[in-house]
Image (cartoon, grey):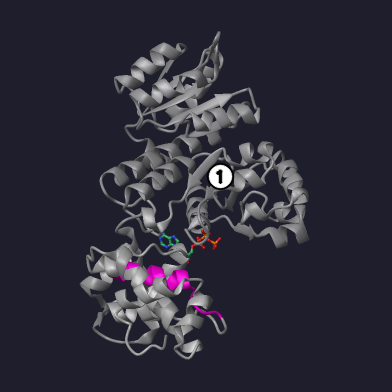
Amino acid sequence: MTQDISAGRRILVLEDDETLRLVISRALTRAGFDVRATASPSSAIERMARRDADLLVADVLLGDENFLDRLEELQHVRPDAPVLVISAQTTAATAIQAVRGGAYEYLPKPFDLDDLVDAVCRALDTGERAGQQRSGANPFPDLVGRSPAMQTAFRLLARLSTASAPVLFTGPDGSGRASAARTLHRACKPGKALVEAGPDRLRREGVQIFREATGAGLLLRRAERWDDAIQDMVLEQLDQLADTRLYVTALADVRTAMAPALFERLAVGHVDLPPLRARGDDRLRLFEHFLKKHGRTDLAIARDAAEFINAYPWPGEVAELERTAARLAVQGDRGTLGLPALQEALTAPTAPGTGSTLEDAVRAFVAARLSEHSQDIAGDTAAIVDRAMIETVLAHCGGVRRDAARYLGLNRNTLARRLTALGMDSGGEE
Ligand SMILES: Nc1ncnc2c1ncn2[C@@H]1O[C@H](COP(=O)(O)OP(=O)(O)OP(=O)(O)O)[C@@H](O)[C@H]1O
């Protein structure tokens, strides 16, 4: 594997300690890389800018200079080239600055030379994934998404797959945070287990969960619900993670529910998953993906249904979209999926006793009007709600408008005007 990746790849080593420069260069040359070296940060940036190397291995403290301060400059001239940062400064702040500045991985000194070679291979492999992504191929095929918002998230995932820092996934419930964490874990620790725990399990089992995940991965979900005791425990465990990769999921406003010190350390890598309403046509792509996932390759989606899927805001996010597709997949109708069946599946109760809400019904109605290219959605929606409301109250009052007006909180003239506007002004008693 190393030879496959190293063949013909050029590495630049930036290190001012002559002995270490030699040792690193030799190890990388032995692994099959074409290695060059320098002690000067400016020369390193200049050589990377003229594409003299595919990857940079850089020390942090070089004479009076801190190379982390120049990462942005390097990103600017070579955004495609991975950078591995090595440093004797093993503070969390250094690691955070390195990863935020665009470094692919941070290796604290002293490090094992084999680990360095592995990290270089992983970074180059990820660089290729990012290249595939630029050329249109999805580097994470189990995550569906081609919208610009998801491309940004994938690029970040690709970068984080060679780092070892904790990663915070934020976004609305059901937006795919846990799925993204699982995908990232498979990319960065293939074959290693991923232990998962929500706040309840974390409260019950405490540090035991961290022990169980040693050397593998740990996915802690719903961090916005961590109480102070959990937050203290996680903060303490962060110093003992060693080679356990930590992933955390939370709602976007978790920052307000969490001690700033903990947030800063968890969000070294931060992937914010956009809501479905910001993902354009990805909604239809996901819908088709879920129909297939639930065994239906024979079902075509009618044009109005497809437009509805791309217009509906899906307040329950990908989870709701998947539930709806799964419901339609098991219904077994052959042929083409039309708008009525889709709307019915969307508003059907999800479990005994739980009905869909008024908001759900309004969303479904508005999305249907959008898919019909209606130009008076506000008027249409207000009329439907008004009609249902007034009809129900009038029926309750036996058609007596004076009483109905009182229940509605309207004066009688206003009610009369609304009835006329809705074409409902015949037959009622004054
Ligand atoms: N981009 C995606 N491509 C394919 N499937 C996805 C994608 N995002 C989410 N899913 C699927 O949608 C469902 C919900 O996703 P997931 O459980 O990851 O959401 P979440 O944000 O972690 O929410 P929660 O914490 O409420 O479960 C899962 O079945 C997952 O497989």
Residue at mark 1 = 167
Residue 19 magenta-highlighted = no
Residue 44 image-quadrant placement: top left
Q: Quadrant of the N terminus?
A: top left
Q: Position of residue 202 (x, y in %)?
A: 72, 57
Residue at image location 50% in from the left, 19% down from the top: 69
Horizontal placement of 205 versus 364: left or right?
Answer: right
Q: Quadrant of the C terminus?
A: bottom left
Q: Position of residue 67 (x, y in %)?
A: 50, 18
> Ligand 1 within 8 A of label 1's CB?
no
Q: Using the image, determine if residue 94 lies above or below residue 279.
A: above
Residue 237 image-quadrant placement: top right
Residue at image location 37% in from the left, 53% down from the top: 278
Q: Amino acid at mark 1?
A: Val
Q: Which residues lie in the magenta part?
A: 354-368
In the orientation shown, which residue stands out farthest toward the top?
64
Q: Using the image, determine if residue 281 lies above or below residue 387.
A: above
Residue 360 magenta-highlighted = yes
